[in-house]
Image: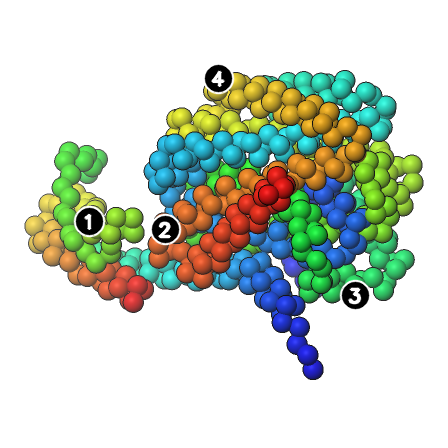
């Protein structure tokens, strides 16, 4: 049986250059989205587990939150910027209600839990990249 | 099948079919009718191949835009600088003007066929109408009417089915020609293959794909759904394109030259053929022309002001200026083109324009692939390599086409 090599090459180019990358790209992005969603869920779970609740002091007035100043903590974490190849700072925004603010013990626990949450986040990122 | 499944099926079928049929303009109809009439089913696979490449580039445009959150022109300016970007957008605008020019000619010749209006008068009238519509700025209602009118082009699908019912043996032949590229002499058909690529390319569609992603504020998790839409669109658009080539193979004379010859593909519809063809071509071509004008204004505006909103573009003074220049240049090109070609017929004009569009179709493709490489690990290595080979191949075959055309 004689194999028509020219025809095989044509069919190969037709499939690999035409339909295949389209379908492959769809599944590639779908998988990426699934991984990203899973990571987000894990981080959310971690954050929920580390949520600190404090009881409001009796007869304490509830005042609206006003952000008067911001403080950013720069942390050289393991994710590299894809464009520059330089380390990207990770910013952590803590949302603390007035009751926690007035409770030094609760406030201390919130702040001391930050490295744990960041560590967990970075582990999941490293797993994904690895 | 459950009721929800049927609903879901028609939910996909409806919009898919509407966008595929209304996306057909005279360049596609002319080029696919010509290849169908001249080569039968031999080049059906080229239509699928070219459409698949276009769909892949659309996917990449979505992926890149979701990631960068900036327009293609803005990103290219950062990478290759202002001057090179200016050259690239000049080529893109040229491709758009050529597409617009052949649409003006198509509508003019159809009008001439229908009511015997002299072509010069027809061309001036159509140019003024499209300019008036674009300067109107707000034409959503008209756009809906034109989209509905363009649906009459689905008669090509109906006629194909009628033909297949009469000749059931041909189903196997069509399927085989689509699946396995038949043995053809590439050197002889080179220019016609380029014409198919040009007709399928629609460079302006990639710019709109990118801008719509940014304007909708699409998130990464929405991308698979958008990809699915592109795949569905590809299936329907290819189906519509194949139906044109199949009915042309069956009913159009192999030496087709005039617009009348192209209309003969619908001869099964008797006296209604010319009316339905005229309505469909008029509506779909006007839609395409308005999209092209908007695309030209968008890329010029983005180059100057880094905008992300089509609304800003349409409200600007620059939009009116670009619209005016685009329509006037296209009308002048159309006059020169018809004058130079003399009485050689509409098919020759479509072939010329499709080849010219193909010569510049690699520009948005190159922009998108360069940006896809820049998004790093977010991109697939396999797709990076394949898309680079595709763009490299496009540039190479178009260079070969230019060399062949100037007779070197």
Mark number displayed over residue B172: 3
Vertical order, B235 against B297 (above or below):
below
Residue shown at the point (43%, 53%) measured from the top left? B221
Residue A30 percent coordinates (x, y): 46, 59
Image quarter for residue B260? top right
Say yes or no: labels 1 and 4 on the same chain: no
Residue identified by numbered label 1: A89
Residue identified by numbered label 2: B375
Name the chain letter of the residue that bears numbered label 1.
Answer: A
Mark 2: secondary structure: loop
Name the chain letter of the residue that bears numbered label 2.
Answer: B
Mark 3: secondary structure: helix
**Distance (Cα) linking label 3 and label 2:** 43 Å
Give the number of the mark in front: 1 or 4: 4
Residue B70 percent coordinates (x, y): 39, 38
Residue identified by numbered label 4: B317
**Distance (Cα) linking label 2 and label 4:** 35 Å
**Distance (Cα) linking label 1 and label 4:** 42 Å
Mark 4: secondary structure: helix
Name the chain letter of the residue that bears numbered label 4.
Answer: B
**Distance (Cα) linking label 1 and label 3:** 61 Å
**Distance (Cα) linking label 1 and label 2:** 19 Å
């Amino acid at each position: 049986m004689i194999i028509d090599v020219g025809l095989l090459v044509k069919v190969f180019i037709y499939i690999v250059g035409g339909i295949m990358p389209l379908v492959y790209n769809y599944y590639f992005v779908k998988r990426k989205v699934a991984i990203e969603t899973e990571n987000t869920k894990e981080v959310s779970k971690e954050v929920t587990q580390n949520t600190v609740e404090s009881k409001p002091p009796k007869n304490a007035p509830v005042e609206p939150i006003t952000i008067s100043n911001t403080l950013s903590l720069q942390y050289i974490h393991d994710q590299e910027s894809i464009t520059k190849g330089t380390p990207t700072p990770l910013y952590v925004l803590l949302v603390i209600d007035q009751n926690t603010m007035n409770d030094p013990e609760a406030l201390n626990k919130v702040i001391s839990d930050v490295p744990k949450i960041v560590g967990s986040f970075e582990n999941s990122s490293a797993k994904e990249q690895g | 099948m459950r009721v929800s499944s049927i609903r879901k099926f028609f939910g996909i079928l409806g919009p898919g079919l509407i966008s595929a049929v209304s996306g057909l303009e005279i360049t596609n109809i002319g080029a696919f009718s010509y290849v169908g009439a001249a080569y039968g089913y031999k080049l059906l696979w080229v239509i699928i191949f070219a459409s698949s490449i276009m769909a892949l580039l659309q996917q990449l445009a979505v992926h890149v835009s979701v990631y960068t959150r900036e327009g293609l022109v803005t990103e290219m300016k950062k990478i290759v600088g202002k001057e090179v970007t200016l050259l690239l957008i000049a080529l893109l605008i040229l491709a758009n003007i050529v597409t617009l020019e052949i649409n003006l000619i198509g509508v003019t010749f159809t009008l001439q066929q229908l009511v015997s209006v002299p072509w010069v008068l027809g061309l001036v009238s159509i140019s003024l109408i499209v300019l008036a519509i674009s300067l109107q700025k707000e034409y959503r209602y008209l756009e809906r009417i034109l989209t509905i009118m363009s649906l009459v082009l689905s008669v090509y699908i109906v006629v194909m089915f009628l033909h297949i019912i009469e000749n059931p043996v041909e189903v196997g032949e069509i399927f085989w020609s689509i699946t396995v590229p038949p043995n053809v002499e590439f050197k002889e058909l080179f220019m016609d293959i380029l014409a198919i690529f040009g007709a399928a390319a629609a460079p302006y569609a990639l710019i709109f794909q990118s801008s719509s992603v940014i304007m909708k504020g699409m998130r990464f998790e929405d991308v698979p759904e958008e990809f699915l839409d592109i795949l569905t669109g590809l299936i329907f658009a290819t189906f519509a394109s194949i139906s044109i080539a199949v009915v042309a193979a069956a009913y159009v004379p192999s030496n087709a030259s005039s617009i009348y010859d192209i209309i003969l593909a619908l001869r099964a519809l008797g006296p209604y053929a010319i009316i339905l063809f005229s309505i469909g071509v008029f509506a779909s071509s006007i839609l395409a022309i308005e999209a092209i004008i908007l695309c030209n204004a968008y890329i010029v505006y983005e180059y100057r002001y880094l905008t992300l909103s089509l609304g800003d573009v349409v409200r600007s003074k620059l939009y009116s200026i670009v619209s005016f220049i685009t329509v006037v240049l296209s009308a002048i090109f159309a006059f020169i083109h018809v004058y130079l070609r003399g009485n050689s017929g509409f098919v020759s004009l479509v072939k010329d324009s499709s080849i010219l569009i193909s010569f510049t179709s690699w520009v948005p493709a190159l922009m998108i692939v360069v940006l896809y490489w820049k998004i790093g690990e977010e991109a697939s290595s396999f797709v990076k390599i394949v898309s680079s080979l595709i763009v490299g191949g496009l540039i190479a075959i178009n260079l070969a086409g230019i060399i062949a055309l100037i007779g070197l």
